[in-house]
Image (tube, helix red, strand yellow):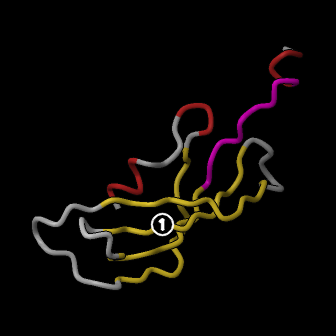
Amino acid sequence: MRMTVDNMPTGETGALGSPSIDELRWTQPVFPGDRLRMKNSIINKKESRSRPDIGTVFMYNEIFNQNGEMMMSFMPIVMCKKKQSADILLSD
């Protein structure tokens, strides 16, 4: 979970929280001393209908050990601030 939080968007398009995690799979046990890395992919996004300044990002995360073996996978759903377009910034 620490790797997931550390890799959330920050700044102008920062993460606002996660309402859920889907399809959590532990495919192998993690042992003390394992070195883990995460591959994070954005698979979809959706604009909020009620709040035009935020959207939801759907991700697929894979965690691998030092041997390249997948240890777990999960699909976090993350609410993020939307990036403002250049047109909006120039009109201010």
Q: Nearer the viewer, residue 55 or 65?
A: 65
Is residue 85 part of the magenta span, yes or no? yes
Task: State the residue position of label 1.
Answer: 61
- In this view, which residue lies farthest toward the front? 67
Query: Residue 44's x, y, as percent?
Result: 70, 63
| Observer-nearest of 71 and 89 | 71
Residue 2 in the image, given as x and y percentages of width and height: 32, 56
User: As displayed, is residue 40 above or below residue 74?
Assistant: above
Looking at the figure, which quarter contains the N terminus? bottom left
Farthest residue toward the left? 32
State the SS at label 1.
Answer: strand
Name the amino acid, label 1.
Answer: Asn
Q: Is residue 16 magenta?
A: no
Span shown in magenta: 79-87
Residue 26 on image: x %, y %: 35, 83
**Residue in the picture at 10% in, 69% down:** 32
Left or right: residue 75 compared with residue 32: right
Q: Quick one: 40 or 22, which is closer to the camera?
A: 40
* Quarter the C terminus occupies: top right
Is 17 located above or below residue 1 in the figure? above
Picture residue at 37% right of the left edge, 76% below the top? 72
Where is residue 50, by image quadrant?
Answer: bottom right
Quadrant in the rendering for residue 12:
top right
Name the residue: 21% across, 61% down.
35
